[in-house]
Image (cartoon, grey):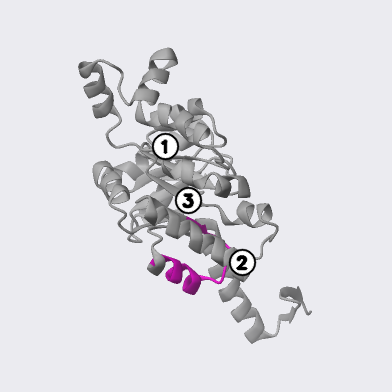
Amino acid sequence: MIANDFKDAVIQRKRLYGTLVTCPMPLCSTYVASIGLDFVFIDTEHIPLDRCQLATMCHLYNSRNLAPFVRISCNDPELARQALDAGAQAIMAPYTETAAQVLELAGAVKFRPLKGERLGRAIEKGTSGHPILDQAVTQRCRDHVLFANIESQTALDHLDEILKIPYLDGIIIGPSDLSYSINLPDEYDHPAFIKVVDDIIDKAKTYKKSVGYHKGYAGKGIEQEIDWIKKGMNVIIHEADVIAFCEKMTQDISRIKNALGDFVAMDGLRQQAI
């Protein structure tokens, strides 16, 4: 999916499929490109990737028509600019809680390369005040996509203000941090947690914004994920390369060892029997 197609799909709230990719090796992109995805989620908040590795990954996946969707490590416009320099098409900062934070990131993502006082005026008025400059900025930022990571009760309290921002293209629910913030730590199957996610999806639909959820280990699995997609979630970040590897290898190796009597199951873990 080429850059302008990805942005158009986000704006039109079409379903987009991706996964978290942690491996920076070029060979990995060959296998990931064969899955049938629209984008790859690259997380620099929790994954120790340097700027060179990030740039390599962005260029590799851009060349394979998979949009690089990068979560920067904190709400810092300079980090957003660096990720865009690396080749990112979509930017998201973790733990976004206020409209002011979104506007700061919008300045870096939607008005690049404006800075300083002129950027402030452009964000406030939606224009730099000069038609030629506006045209140049629009052309330069035409494929950039901005998401907010909704991960706290404070973000929920300010969600209407966040979703009203015209420069914001969508929101992504961060289940782990959100579960802790609403006093349901890791209880992804709790009816109250599920209702919170349902409500976020409904509110995003009301404001005609794309909405997604990073399904790692969290939740009831694929059936819950499918249910939320049917309710309107359209950006699907399904698990991660390392999670898929661990799950598949655990199943296969456990099956082999159980068949040979080498291991016994104890409390959901595996313990050597001989």
Marks 1 and 3, the one that precedes in the sequence = 1
Q: Are marks 1 and 3 in contact (CB under 8 Å)?
A: no
Can you tell which of label 1 and label 2 is closer to the viewer? 2
Q: Amino acid at mark 2?
A: Ala
Compared to residue 215, the image places residue 134 above or below, namely above
Q: Please check the rendered image and state whether residue 226 is part of the magenta-colored stretch, yes or no.
A: yes
- Element under disc 3: strand
Q: Position of residue 165 (x, y in %)?
A: 41, 38
Which mark is on residue 192? 2
Q: Position of residue 21 (x, y in %)?
A: 47, 51
Q: Visible in this render: residue 218?
A: no
Q: Which residues are magenta?
A: 213-229
- 65 or 238, which lies in front? 238
Marks 1 and 2, the one that precedes in the sequence = 1
User: How far apart are the two marked residues, 1 and 3, measured between alpha carbons?
Assistant: 25 Å
Report the residue marked by disc 1.
56
User: How far apart are the two marked residues, 3 and 2, measured between alpha carbons?
Assistant: 19 Å
Q: Residues within 10 Å of mark 3 (few under 14, many from 20)?
A: many
Q: Residues within 10 Å of mark 2 (few under 14, many from 20)?
A: some
Q: Visible in this render: residue 205?
A: yes
Report the residue marked by disc 3.
172
Q: Position of residue 213 (x, y in %)?
A: 48, 57
Q: How many marks?
A: 3
Question: Is residue 165 found left or right of 11 in the rendered image?
Answer: right
Q: Amino acid at mark 3?
A: Ile
Q: Residue at x 58, y 57 (%)?
A: 175
Q: Residue at x 32, y 54 (%)?
A: 13
Q: Are marks 3 and 2 in contact (CB under 8 Å)?
A: no
